[in-house]
Image (tube, rainbow, N blue to C red):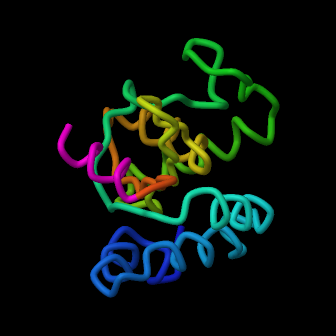
Amino acid sequence: MADDPETTVDGARTAAERGELGAWVTAFLSSDGSDNAALAEKLAAEKPYWLGPVRLRFNELHRLAGPPDQPVLERLDDDDDLQTVEGMEESINDGWEPAPLVVSADGEQLIVEDGNHRIEGLRRSGRRNYWAVVGFETTGQRGEFVER
């Protein structure tokens, strides 16, 4: 799997260094790889302050979708989902580094907005954590997160 250099962890890191991480999130979510312009618009309006990439453990994340053996709201169990995850797992084992997860902070809870398939592919390849960009409603919330 080849990624556009801008949709990599390094691309997110570069955007953060330029103070453009929010724009990076919007561009990434609107890209062919994510194809989620509606989410990009929602997060741009609700989470204008971003931090990252930071490494987060999967057990710290509130996943909205995943396999039946994981604590999630929606199960990834149809054939397309499973093929996507299996393809990602194989690519990760071959050295592919996925784009960072897109996570939003809601109080103490970290919600995976984009990256449920990536988490499962990473988890199946033996990883317990991965890079994420985290969105916040206020700079104060971002500061509290950094202090924790």
Q: Quadrant of the N terminus?
A: bottom right
Q: Is residue 135 left or right of residue 29?
A: left
Q: Nearer the viewer, residue 139 or 108?
A: 139
Residue numbers of the magenta segment: 139-148
Side of 5 where 40 appears, left or right = right
**Farthest bottom residue in view:** 18
At a point 61% along the width and 51% down the height, the residue shown is 114
Is 145 magenta? The answer is yes
Name the image quarter holding residue 145: top left
Position of 99 relative to 79 (above/below): below
Residue lying at 36% horizontally and 82% vertically, measured from the top left: 19
Please tell me how many numbered marks the rendered image carries: 0
Report which quarter residue 138 is drawn in: bottom left
7 over 88 or under it: above or below: below
Q: Is residue 8 left or right of residue 75?
A: left
| Residue 63 on image: x %, y % | 57, 30
- Across and down, in percent, residue 38 comes to 80, 62
Asked if 19 appears above or below 115 in the picture, the reply is below
Q: Quadrant of the C terminus?
A: top left
Q: Residue at x 56, y 15 (%)?
A: 71
